[in-house]
């Protein structure tokens, strides 16, 4: 018999414990493993639970118990998670984590540490919640060159945008609902400012291209600049506004990872992904494109992915190499986003359609009234669009890239 431990009893940690006890018998029968929940690490008190006797406040209880072979890290944040995870790996205990910040900032180092100690560092739950994406990319799609990924990677912002568009809810009210439902980060600015999606596109980019992509190398914008008039204009013209994490291989061989709101045509499957759902479209030179879809946040959906990793580790002997990449010494392989052609939705005030057409060329007008003109530019280098917008000064009220 071996044991596993869960570090953190917040939303995902309590979900992992709940799902384990709910399905324990089934898991043991189907997977043929002899596994017990040994410890739950948390500094808080949780009296009155059927498994209250499993709680400890001391990481050494986990580290010093040789029967603990697998540890789930579901605390979030880099400290003390990084320290705890490293100590577990150094003792040969495999670690499974839902902590995208940890993986995005320390992934290459922790993967190497796991290999050096003949154990595994798995993080299926770090990206896409319940969606199997990390392992399939490294196994089922391994025979391809990945050329691009575009995804709705943050459940909270997708929930907020859906509420804004479908029910006219204001952003703050929708965010409060997302917090109540357990979707948002402890500091929800990580969701709405795009940092959570940035961490996830770092993980997917690192997996797809084999070199660690650090968050500070990724141009990141959130959803706070999106106004109701933008979402209304989008809907009236066959688009949805979505926060998209993307990465693509450019013609010069560099890669361009980015997080930003996008006008997504409703002819694209991503345009129809609503509520807390995530969807990740992967493009490759053999399979063309595949889409992964499911609940991207929430207690049990995320716990489902953590538990899958725990079971995998419990069944494995040695290192599972299904999730791996090398460290990167610098960002010389990252393309500058302003050098890349893009098509942009622009909303202006106090300017005529004629002036816009003279400036931007053959634009597609989406809405015009006495005061406002909204349009989509033809593809141009983003730096050129920036220069044209600068010539309009504060007449430009908003700009959103088109997918
Ligand atoms: N806050 C995250 C989200 C949780 O909303 O997607 C799941 O990673």
Image: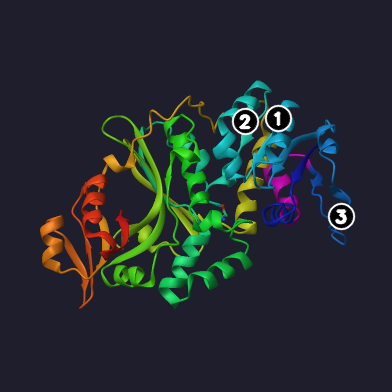
- What element does badge 2 sit on? helix
Residue at 40%, 60% (x, y): give it: 242
The N terminus, quarter of image: top right
- What element does badge 1 sit on? helix
Q: Dot 2, how many residues are within 10 Å of its Cα: few (below 14), some (14-19), or many (20+)? A: many
Q: Which numbered disc, 3 or 1, marks the residue that appears first in the sequence?
A: 3
Looking at the picture, tell me which residue is in the foreground, 109 or 380. 380
Q: Which residue lies furthest to the top in this view?
A: 116
Distance from the alpha carbon under mark 3 to that under mark 1: 26 Å
Q: Is residue 369 above or below residue 142?
A: below
Residue at 47%, 71% (x, y): give it: 163
Q: Tell me the mark number nearer the camera, choosing from 2 and 3.
A: 2
Report which residue position mark 2 lands on.
110
Report which residue position mark 3 lands on.
52
Find out if the beta carbon at label 1 lies less than 8 Å from the nearest ligand 1 atom: no
Is 25 situated left or right of 111 in this image?
right
Quarter location, residue 349: bottom left
Quarter location, residue 100: top right
Find out if the beta carbon at label 3 lies less than 8 Å from the nearest ligand 1 atom: no
Q: Position of residue 328 (x, y in %)?
A: 48, 26
Q: Where is residue 94 in the image (x, y as percent from the top left)?
A: 69, 33
Quarter location, residue 32: top right
Q: Dot 1, how many residues are within 10 Å of its Cα: few (below 14), some (14-19), or many (20+)? A: many
- Residue 316 magenta: no
State which image quarter holds ligand 1.
Answer: bottom right
Span colored in magenta: 20-35
């Amino acid at each position: 018999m071996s044991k596993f431990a869960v570090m953190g009893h917040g939303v995902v940690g309590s979900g992992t414990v709940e799902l384990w006890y709910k399905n324990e018998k089934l898991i043991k029968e189907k997977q043929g493993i002899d596994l017990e929940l040994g410890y739950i690490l948390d500094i808080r008190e949780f009296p009155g639970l059927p498994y209250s006797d499993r709680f400890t406040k001391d990481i050494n209880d986990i580290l010093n118990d040789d029967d603990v072979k697998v540890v789930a890290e579901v605390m979030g944040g880099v400290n003390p998670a990084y320290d705890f995870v490293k100590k577990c790996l150094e003792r040969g205990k495999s670690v499974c984590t839902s902590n995208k910040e940890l993986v995005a900032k320390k992934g290459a180092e922790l993967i190497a540490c796991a290999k050096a100690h003949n154990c595994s560092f798995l993080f299926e739950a770090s990206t896409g919640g319940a969606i199997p994406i990390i392992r399939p990319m490294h196994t089922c799609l391994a025979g391809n060159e990945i050329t691009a990924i575009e995804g709705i990677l943050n459940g909270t912002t997708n929930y907020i945008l859906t509420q804004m568009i479908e029910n006219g809810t204001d952003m703050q009210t929708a965010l409060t609902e997302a917090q109540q439902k357990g979707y948002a980060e402890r500091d929800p600015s990580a969701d709405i400012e795009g940092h959570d999606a940035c961490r996830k596109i770092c993980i997917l980019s690192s997996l797809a291209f084999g070199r660690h992509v650090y968050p500070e190398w990724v141009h990141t914008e959130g959803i706070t600049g999106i106004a109701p008039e933008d979402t209304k204009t989008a809907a009236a013209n066959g688009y949805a506004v979505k926060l998209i994490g993307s990465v693509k291989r450019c013609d010069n061989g560099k890669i361009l990872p980015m997080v930003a709101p996008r006008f997504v045509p409703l002819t694209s499957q991503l345009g129809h992904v609503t509520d807390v759902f995530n969807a990740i479209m992967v493009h490759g030179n053999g399979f063309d494109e595949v889409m992964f879809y499911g609940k991207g946040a929430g207690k049990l959906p995320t716990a489902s992915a953590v538990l899958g990793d725990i079971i995998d580790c419990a069944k494995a002997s040695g290192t599972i190499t299904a999730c791996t990449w090398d460290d990167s010494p610098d960002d010389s392989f990252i393309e500058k986003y302003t050098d890349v052609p893009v098509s942009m939705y622009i909303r202006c005030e106090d300017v005529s359609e004629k002036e816009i057409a003279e400036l931007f060329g053959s634009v597609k007008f989406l809405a015009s009234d006495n005061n406002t003109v909204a349009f989509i530019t033809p593809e141009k280098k983003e730096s050129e669009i920036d220069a044209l917008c600068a010539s309009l000064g504060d007449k430009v009220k908003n700009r959103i890239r088109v997918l």
